[in-house]
Image: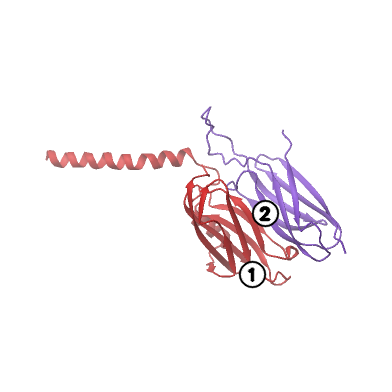
Chain colours: A purple, B red
Amino acid sequence: MAKRKSLIKIKPKKFKDGEIVKVSFMVMHPMDTGTQKDKKTKELIPAKYINSVKFNYKGKEITNMTVWESLSTNPVFTTYMKVDGKGELKVTFTDSTGEVHETSKKIKPKG
Amino acid sequence: MQRRDFFKKLGVVAAATALTPTISFASGAKSKNAMTYKTALDAITGGKTAKVSSKVKLKTPEIAENGAVVPVTVNVDSPMTSDNYVKAIHILASKNFNARSIDVNLTPANGKAMFSTRIKLGGTQDVIALVELSSGEFLMASQNVKVTIGGCG
């Protein structure tokens, strides 16, 4: 299985403790709905889409999403988050075919 | 009598031609979680009525050239404290074969009730943002999006 590329982006790059920052999670994923046909073979492309996405910060779940197939390919999920000391932001997602993926980013507030 | 028969047959043929394309489309493009907008709305709210509110700000383009990528941003005016916060944001598309796009469960640790993503739209339709508050109330906002090329086959 090809390795999935994913990325966690935080805006602004430098932030202080207690600040509210924008967090985006991007992932390279086909998000096939299961109703499209292959143009060459004329067969249905099997469904493969992200089921759920979870944001964990310092071991606590802050955001949890249930996703259906009508999201775009290579989806982006953007929310806000309150910085509360040093810790790790962990993003986990599962796929309708059972694929599980995890990415993490260290959060270091300055000042 | 002949004239009557002719019209009868004509009626049958017209009805058949009108029905067949819709039937074949429905059976050909059926998904496991096909859900109409109404059933999706009932499943989320549980029979409660959702109020249209100016607190919910839905930002989408009015005309989307490509239905495969439609950016959607939902902003909710809320203090996000432990006893008054936004519990969930749901994004629905009224005419997609599965009307539910995404359900986002938020907590006070988010600090700000905002969510943004990109969705697929099968055709010109309404995009609806349904917001559940911690008090159990439902608020909503909707916008019509014109799609020139469908994206959700």
Q: Position of residue B129 (x, y in %)?
A: 57, 60
What residue lies at 72% left-to-right and 63% top-to-bottom? B107
Callout 2 secondary element: strand
Q: Position of residue B5 (x, y in %)?
A: 17, 39
Which residue carries the number 2 mark?
Answer: A65
- Among the 4 quarters of the image, the one containing residue A6: top right
Residue type highlighted by circle 1: Asp
Whether B150 is drawn above or below B60: the answer is above
| Image mark 1: chain | B
- Among the 4 quarters of the image, the one containing residue B16: top left
On whether disc 2 and disc 1 are found on a single subunit, the reply is: no
Q: CA distance from mark 2 to mark 1?
A: 20 Å
Circle nearer the viewer, 2 or 1: 1
What residue lies at 77% left-to-right and 45% top-to-bottom? A102
Whether B113 is drawn above or below A99: the answer is below
Residue type highlighted by circle 2: Met
Callout 1 secondary element: loop
Farthest top residue in view: A41
Nearer to us in this view, A82 or B95? A82
Whether A85 is drawn above or below A43: the answer is below
Which residue carries the number 1 mark?
Answer: B77
